[in-house]
């Protein structure tokens, strides 16, 4: 491996040294603005950064570069903008003008101010990238609500329905529906009347409730007919010594019994005593 002294003696190294002595080699911009201690050079590096920003802003206007290329260009522009701010701060420290206060605003190709006063900014075709377009869409302004006075201006007779018949369409439709409703009502009334009449006839045809105490006389058999004369000859008769209640009396007795059971189950002793006293006074 060659030594440093041998490298310095090569043709390329001697040529570069000669160019630097003549001032033809371009000086590289310092990585940190704090490394520069001369105001003219700081102004020079700031102008260089602005020139690079202008070139990249012109390139990013082409939407056919592709999404990834556009994103890279936008990142480089934002990086140069931050670097420009550092050089402006250094220029102010060296006694130069305050470009942050008097500098022009950043505009896009349409002459509009670049959105975003601070932080990350989008230029050219980067504003139409997926996920970025939604950031610049403005929400629609809310609809203005009308005042009560403005609403009352639109209230008239037509609002309350007083002029619905003026068009000549509503009245014929109402008449047609009225006739149909009347026919349906009449038909329903006739059907109910027929059903009631048929129900009355069925009630008349039905037999009355058979009395539980009614005795049906059946035709006696030959043997019974033979025995009856014998009984008549013997003079045997049957007499009921106990009064037999009628069907109505039995039903009333059952109702009274049911009432007493309910009173004993649900009524208190005091209420039962009061009820008995009332019956005694009334003679029931």
Image (cartoon, rainbow, N blue to C red):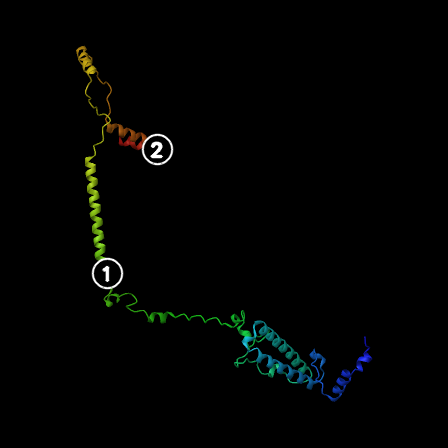
Describe residue 144's horizontal placement relative to residue 172 as left or right.
Answer: right
Quarter occupied by the C terminus: top left
Quadrant of the rendered structure where residue 261 is? top left
Describe residue 268's horizontal placement relative to residue 177 as left or right.
Answer: right
Viewer-closest of 156 and 263: 156
Q: Residue at x 21, y 48 (%)?
A: 189
Viewer-closest of 284 and 69: 69
Comparing labels 1 and 2, the label whose residue is closer to the camera = 1
Describe residue 120's horizontal placement relative to residue 189 as left or right.
Answer: right
Viewer-closest of 70 and 204: 70
Quarter occupied by the N terminus: bottom right
In the image, residue 18 above or below residue 155 = below
Residue 166 horizontal/vertical position (percent): 24, 68
- Between the C-alphas of marks 1 and 2, the distance is 59 Å
* Residue 262 image label: 2
Residue 57 horizontal/vertical position (percent): 58, 79
Residue 226 horizontal/vertical position (percent): 19, 13
Quadrant of the rendered structure where residue 93 is? bottom right
* Residue 174 image label: 1
SS for dot 2 = helix
First in sequence: mark 1 or mark 2? 1
Q: Residues within 10 Å of mark 2 (few under 14, many from 20)?
A: few
In the image, residue 161 above or below residue 73 = above
Viewer-closest of 51 and 257: 51
Q: Residue at x 17, y 11 (%)?
A: 233
Q: Residue furthest top?
A: 234
């Amino acid at each position: 491996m060659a030594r440093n002294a041998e490298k310095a003696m090569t043709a390329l190294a001697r040529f570069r040294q000669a160019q630097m002595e003549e001032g033809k080699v371009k000086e590289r911009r310092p990585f940190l603005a704090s490394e520069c201690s001369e105001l003219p050079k700081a102004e020079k590096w700031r102008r260089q950064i602005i020139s690079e920003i202008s070139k990249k802003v012109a390139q990013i206007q082409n939407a056919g570069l592709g999404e990834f290329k556009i994103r890279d260009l936008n990142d480089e522009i934002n990086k140069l903008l931050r670097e420009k701010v550092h050089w402006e701060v250094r220029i102010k420290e060296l006694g130069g003008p305050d470009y942050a206060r008097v500098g022009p605003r950043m505009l896009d190709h349409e002459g509009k101010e670049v959105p975003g006063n601070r932080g990350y900014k989008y230029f050219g075709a980067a504003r139409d990238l997926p996920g970025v377009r939604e950031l610049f869409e403005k929400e629609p302004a809310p609809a203005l609500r009308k005042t009560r006075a403005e609403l009352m201006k639109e209230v008239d007779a037509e609002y309350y329905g007083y002029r619905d018949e003026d068009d000549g369409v509503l009245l014929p439709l109402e008449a047609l529906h009225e006739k149909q409703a009347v026919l349906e009502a009449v038909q329903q009334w006739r059907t109910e009347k027929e059903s009631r009449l048929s129900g009355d006839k069925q009630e008349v045809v039905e037999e009355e409730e058979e009395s539980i105490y009614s005795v049906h006389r059946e035709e006696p058999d030959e043997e019974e007919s033979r025995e009856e004369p014998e009984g008549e000859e013997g003079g045997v008769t049957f007499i009921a010594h106990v009064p037999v209640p009628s069907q109505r009396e039995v039903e009333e007795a059952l109702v009274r019994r049911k009432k007493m059971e309910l009173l004993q189950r649900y009524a208190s002793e005091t209420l039962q005593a009061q009820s008995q006293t009332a019956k005694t006074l009334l003679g029931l």
